[in-house]
Amino acid sequence: TAARNAAAPGSPAARYMEGTLDAAPKLGPHFLGAFVGGQLVGFVATKSYPPDRRAAARLPAGSEWIIDAMGTRLSYRGCNIGTALAEECMTRCKAAASKAAATTAKTHTSTHSMDGTGRPKEEGAHEEPSPAFAYRIDVVPSAVGFWQKLGFELEEPTGEQAYYAERGGDLPMVKCL
């Protein structure tokens, strides 16, 4: 069943998102909508990863929040709705990745109780997990400027993507969260 959820309090999306309709399974795709006066003015659809493909590709936690498609109603462009939706997805991605990293670190420190010198670690001592996540997206050439304003950098396309990029196809971009 679909659940209607508000954007995270204090998030950039909270200004525009009266709620989101997330009718997706845990691994995506997720569909988020930005509403003004009950009218849908922007949307995001995230990538879908079936459990077997996710495991085979060794996709990190949070990858179900990678943006696959998004759009903003023409009359609302320039109002930061797309920015708010993109930032909401990145926030949720980072939270999922950080939660998984903390769980991994907790498991690691409970099973390996020695510090770097071979002595037992002090009670409660543990290494902090790295919350970094390389958020990769494929971008239509006309949207590169939008994504660069959000801190994304162009990557060199490879393989089949390089072939299509030469002909005006999507370009790979990345941002470290």
Image (cartoon, helix red, strand yellow):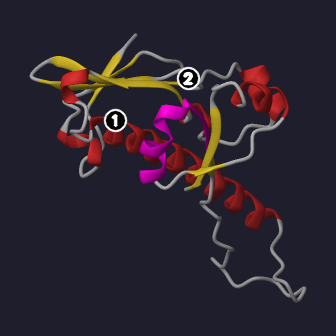
**Disc sitting over residue 17 in the figure:** none
Residue 92 rendering spot, x and y as whole percentages: 46, 42
Q: Quadrant of residue 59?
A: top right
Is 75 left or right of 162, judged from the image as shown?
Answer: left
**Quarter of the image where the N terminus is located:** top left
Residue 67 rendering spot, x and y as whole percentages: 52, 31
The residue under label 1 is which amino acid type?
Answer: Gly
* Contact, mark 1 vs mark 2 (Cβ under 8 Å): no
The residue carrying mark 2 is 28
Residue extending farthest left? 37
The residue carrying mark 1 is 82
Residue 93 in view (yes/no): yes
Q: Quadrant of residue 87?
A: top left
Asked if residue 137 is positioned above or below residue 99 in the image, the reply reads above
Q: Nearer the viewer, residue 110 or 58?
A: 58
The residue under label 2 is which amino acid type?
Answer: Gly
- First to last magenta residue range: 136-150
Residue 44 in view (yes/no): no
Residue extending farthest front? 167
Residue shown at 42% from the left, 43% from the top: 146
Under circle 2, the secondary element is loop
